[in-house]
Image (cartoon, rainbow, N blue to C red):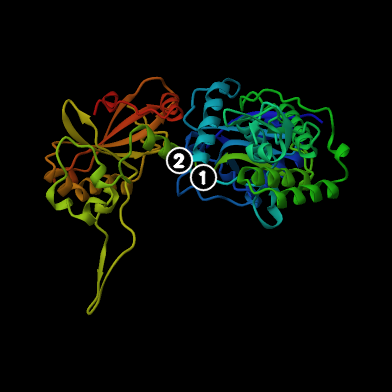
Amino acid sequence: MKVVSRYVREQKRYTKNDLKSKFSFDEDGVEKFIKNLKAYGVLKSVKNTDDQLEMSDLVDDDVEITDETAESGDCLYVFTYVGVITCGSRVIKVYPKYLLSKKDDNVLDEMKQVVKVLERYSRSEEQIINVFNGDGENRSFNILAVILFLINDYYEYGIYTNSEDIIEVNGEGEILWGKTIDESFALIEDNRPYYMELYTEKSVEDDMDYFKRLHECVLTECSKQLHAAQLDELFDMDRIELSEETLEDFGDKEYILERIVKELNLQFNTHRQILLKTLYAYISQDRKMLDENDGISMFGTTAYHAVWEKACAEVFDNKLNTMLCQLKMTVPLAEKYQGKKERRQKLIDIIEKPIWQGIDTEAKAADTLIPDLISIPCIDGQDWFIIFDAKYYNLQLEKGKSLRGNPGVGDVTKQYLYQLAYRDFINVHHIVEVRNCFLMPTEGNEIVVKGVAKMQMLEALGLKNIQIRLIPAVKLYDYYLSDVHMNIDELRL
């Protein structure tokens, strides 16, 4: 079976012939490929126009068109996903849309970092492994996610072992004083007992344990599959060769699953239970990653903007969910926020919620404005109040070119309103320096001072215009993966 492993760019427009050529399909094969990817929400189709060919983002006006239109050749296909997808023997590696100048065969280093970012994001969001993708007729076992979980679990915790406690005489383990006193002969000297034989206890791992061998066999098989799919280098995983056995050596599928269920009933350790359940899922589905049945498996997200927002929030020290009493400012918390209830409020709780007033009733709405992140750094001995909005956009703001890839008017007005919502907090704490800023990714190596977004009627209220900064994604991800804050001075706000 020939494995075809290719890179594509998120949000780039591809024709049917592009996909046919890139992934080595005939006409029927590419139609089935497109239909499968669209069913799982990772591929969309839009009208084939000159404007669309120049676009780097999907916008609300880009209404997805139907397969009937697609068959006429009047459409383009857009990957709305970042990560890795396997579809039969085809491996699709989707890199982020801001890598505009990169060629498909020259993005390995950036994609390896993106994979690490996706892994950390998944852990921070406490996402449970998605064993299945889709639902109904489109439900498919997510073999790739299961393989990655098993290998990462092995790197962190090692092989599954069962140990046996054995008792020795004069061994090197812990002395069992009760058994020694009850069953050993003691010599008495100066009214002190001396025991010539001490009973000791130690744990011995059973190298021939069924589940240890089964775990080693599955890991070796998983590693072979990852290598066959040409993904071991992308995920930075060395070959794992722990066993020469095959699953058939452990009995038929029903027998293996029955043994796992019995072992689960004996184990109360949470990690071991999760591992055993994952092994059960892997064996029960009996599916290989590169099966020709076109089953879909995925590692990544259709909401990469949330990953960008999360990384920005951590790197720029988001205080939005910090209690007021824990804010480290150069001035004490103002008296109006010193009450027991007020001190335990979070910065996000200060924003006013809409009140709905009727003729004889009044109610407060549950929702309100929520900024992406707020930072209150001390710069040159003064507190600054900075309202950031992490925008995962490819902004085109160049002389002689039309404006493209820009946040909408709602995003701009909300940034002004955030400052208005915090105006009282800013004033009572004598914070003079206030900034508003959009953060967007760039493939470059330097922070770019791109310009400002402004509305004169809101600027006239004394509100700060929204500055635009393009942040090198590689640099921001380095900070994110290292759990280090970026110096806000670098933004030149």
| Residue 342: image tag | none
Query: Where in the figure is residue 108, as x and y percent of width and height?
Result: 58, 22
Q: Is residue 362 left or right of residue 175?
A: left
Q: Nearer the viewer, residue 293 or 316?
A: 316
Q: Residues within 10 Å of mark 2 (few under 14, many from 20)?
A: some
Q: Considering the image in quadrants, where does the C terminus appear?
A: top left
Q: Label 2: which residue?
A: 305
The image quadrant that residue 313 belongs to is: top left
Q: Is residue 30 left or right of residue 352?
A: right
Which residue appears at 51% of the width and 45% of the height?
A: 126
Mark with earlier residue (2, 1):
1
Q: For the residue marked with disc 1, what is the amino acid?
A: Glu
Q: Nearer the viewer, residue 120 or 477?
A: 120
User: Secondary structure beneath disc 2?
Assistant: helix
Query: Where in the figure is residue 448, as x and y percent of width and height?
Result: 33, 24
Query: Where in the figure is residue 26, as x and y percent of width and height?
Result: 77, 36
Q: Nearer the viewer, residue 303 or 217?
A: 217
Q: Label 1: which residue?
A: 126
Q: For the residue marked with disc 2, what is the amino acid?
A: His
Which residue appears at 46% of the width and 29% of the height?
A: 481
Q: Nearer the viewer, residue 412 or 25?
A: 412
Q: Considering the image in quadrants, where does the N terminus appear?
A: top right
Which residue appears at 76% of the width and 47% of the height?
A: 260
Query: Where in the figure is residue 44, as x and y percent of width and height?
Result: 58, 45
User: Secondary structure beneath disc 1?
Assistant: loop
Above or below residue 220? Residue 351 is: below
Image mark count: 2
Above or below residue 368? Residue 292 is: above
Q: Residues within 10 Å of mark 1 (few under 14, many from 20)?
A: few
Give the CA distance from mark 2 to mark 1: 18 Å
